[in-house]
Image (cartoon, helix red, strand yellow):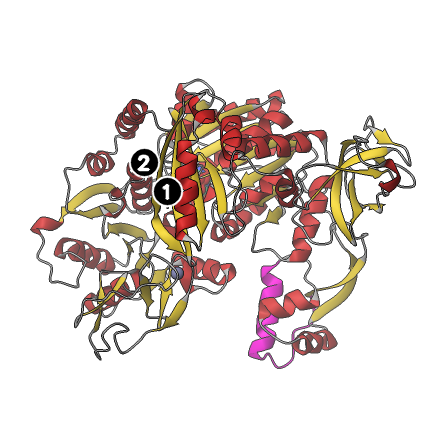
Amino acid sequence: MAETGAEVFEEGALVGVLTTQPLDRLLDYRAPEGGCVLGALVEVPLGPRLVPGVVWGPGKGDFDIRKVRSVQRVLDAAPMREEMRQFLTRVADYTLTPMPAMLRLATRAPGLGDAPAMRRVYRLGAAAPQRLTEARARVIEVLGEYGGLALTLGELAEAAGVGASVVKGLVAQGAVLEEDSPRDMPYPRLDPGLHGKPLTADQAAAAQVLRTGVEGGAYGTTLLKGITGSGKTEVYLEAVAACLARGRQALVLLPEIALTGAFLTRVEARFGARPAEWHSGVTMTERRRCWRMVGQGGAQLVVGARSALFLPFRDLGLIVVDEEHDTSYKQEDGVLYNARDMAVLRASLDSAQVVLASATPSLESWANVEAGKYARIELTSRFGPAVLPAMRAVDMRGEALTAGHWVSPTLQRGIAERLARGEQALLFLNRRGYAPVTLCRACGHQIGCDDCDARMVEHRFLKRLVCHQCGATRPMPTLCPSCGAEGRLAPVGPGVERLAEEAQALFPDARVAVLSSDLYGTARALKDHIAAIADGGADIIIGTQLVAKGHNFPLLTLVGVIDADLGLQGSDLRAAERTFQLMRQVTGRAGRGAVAGEAMLQTYQPEHPVIRAILAGDEEAFWRAEAAERRAAGVPPYGRMAGIILSSPDVQAVFDLGNAMARADAPLRQIGAQVFGPAPAPIARVRGRHRVRLLVKADRGVALQPALAAWVAQFRIPANLRLSIDIDPQSFL
Ligand code: ADP
Ligand code: ZN
């Protein structure tokens, strides 16, 4: 299995092994019988246990040589390549993450070392089931949905929500086949020679630029900017085709699992088979298969979430980051990395191309284009008859609305018109649940979470109060928890559930559907629901942020933004950018079919520069103004930032350490960086832990990470206190 040219350690030679255990150094072992190669995945004894690791280099020999133990075994998996080891090291240095945590990220699949074995799998048989009970129908349906993917008995029973006996009953009838198949089958071949859709002139020109990049075989990043519906996906699939035709692997990152379904169907139509999938919605069996096949070259294309970046590709030629501006590319716990930026790093190590696709690029990417680091191509018109929606503001100061109502008369008229024509309307409100605040009308108490500095949000579907910070829930009380008054608790403000109630009251005959991530038990249920709505299964769609992310609703012709001002509040330096992107994305949902669309933004400040920029559709002007402000303030992307969050159950301890850190800032002053804080974080308590923030600001181009490391190293961190460093923070909570 050794690659040609790989460094080999003979049996007994000292090797340095990186393990997944939280140790700050490599451990020395002796190479096992038969030797091992550099990068080999191994199992080594550590104390009484066996732990996984990777042969990272020669041993140092600074440990008592008589006590050095032997590598237990070399796992039956492709050795980690030099580029991957470099990638993990560079991400660790950039994000100030210990290497064992990086290795855990790169080996997150179950049973990696187990020998390939046979396992029993299930698929659709030829016979029709006798007596089709509801449970049997679900089994058949799940097998159909998973297409060619193998399911074990446990996975099939769980996905269908039935007992194993139901499956066995179907096997006995021949309606389901049971067979032994090797684990880790290669994925079906994708055929890049099949033809894509005939492209329009500007799509073809864009595709040609991307193809040329891929064929050059070197690193390069291109921003593919194009309004929603302009065919960015069609265009980057041509780059994927060129990559596969060269025999190299491709990776497409999507921000949202619910989007993968529609995308996989498009890949299948384009290349004749489904690609490998990597995200939290795939079964453990498939995860392991994906990890191993990517490493052995049995997977040509992976469609995945951000962590797919850490799969052991053999020869990665292209990474597409779709909706590159999406904040979910930033991992917000554990290893704090931004998958968009790390994709660029990985590609530069692998001599691969990156395509960043978006209708509303991040200011970071925009600035990299200006600086000449990224190329840029643009698609300016929507495909086919679809045109961008007409945009208008609804000035709420002039609308007659009674308290507890949020749909203005102007927006109501718009909805009525669309419904009369059999079209769909979307009401957008980025607030889950029924009402954001529950207030006691007797004493003024607002119900909060016991463990967080946050209000509990009423969810009527669940009949419970939920904390959106920690997830704690409790039944909706009838008495005020503070003064004990009965029947005086009242909802304040709108959430999507309450908005749905209002829409239903206004339009009693309309079918109202709510799209919010918390209302569906599984990603699959959500996907099905979205597909049903796209097919015309609802007249009025009430949606949170979820609807902004690339779903295609052909019948949708009116988007009403309930509160366009919502995102403009708050201290986040990206508030304007986020609002601009979100409004553009949401309003872009309207009119993707043959009928022209319309967008209405309800606002109390129609003269606000961001609202005006959205209405005018003058993106270049918006970005230029935003860039000028950030440049003047010296903040990203024109300056560097790092957030430090200290948290502990002990409020004194976090402030003491925070103050000590602010005083001992010499290592930071040496590079001209400034420290701000400590200050209570905007959400000052989560899960019972008090949170304090410090913010470090520096010029572009300084070596920030080593200075941060030297700064933090001066302190001993008490056991119950957590310190996390967030380089390029995206969220300021
Ligand atoms: P984007 O990714 O920019 O939002 P898509 O690639 O999803 O755009 O295209 C929007 C819709 O238009 C899709 O349904 C797509 O199949 C269709 N489309 C785009 N370009 C073409 C083309 N050249 N021929 C046929 N259909 C196209
Ligand atoms: Zn809470």
Magenta stretch encompasses residue 143 = yes
> Label 2: which residue?
573
Above or below for 491 versus 647: below
- Of helix, strand and loop, which one carries label 1? loop
Q: Is residue 75 left or right of residue 374?
A: right
Q: Nearer the viewer, residue 428 or 127?
A: 428
Residue 427 sits in which quadrant? bottom left
Which label number is shown at residue 732?
Answer: 1
Tell me the quadrant of ligand 1. top left
Discs 2, 1 touching: Cβ within 8 Å: yes
Q: CA distance from mark 2 to mark 1?
A: 9 Å
Which label number is shown at residue 215?
Answer: none
Q: Which residues are magenta?
A: 124-146
**Classed neighbour count for the residue bearing mark 1: other residues with Cα under 10 Å, few (<14), some (14–19), many (≥20):** some
Tell me the quarter of the image containing the N terminus: top right
Going by the numbered disc 2, the residue's amino acid type is: Leu
Residue 180 sits in which quadrant? bottom right
Ligand 2 lies under 8 Å from the Cβ of mark 2: no
Q: Name the residue rendered at 60%, 30% in the picture.
A: 90
**Classed neighbour count for the residue bearing mark 2: other residues with Cα under 10 Å, few (<14), some (14–19), many (≥20):** some
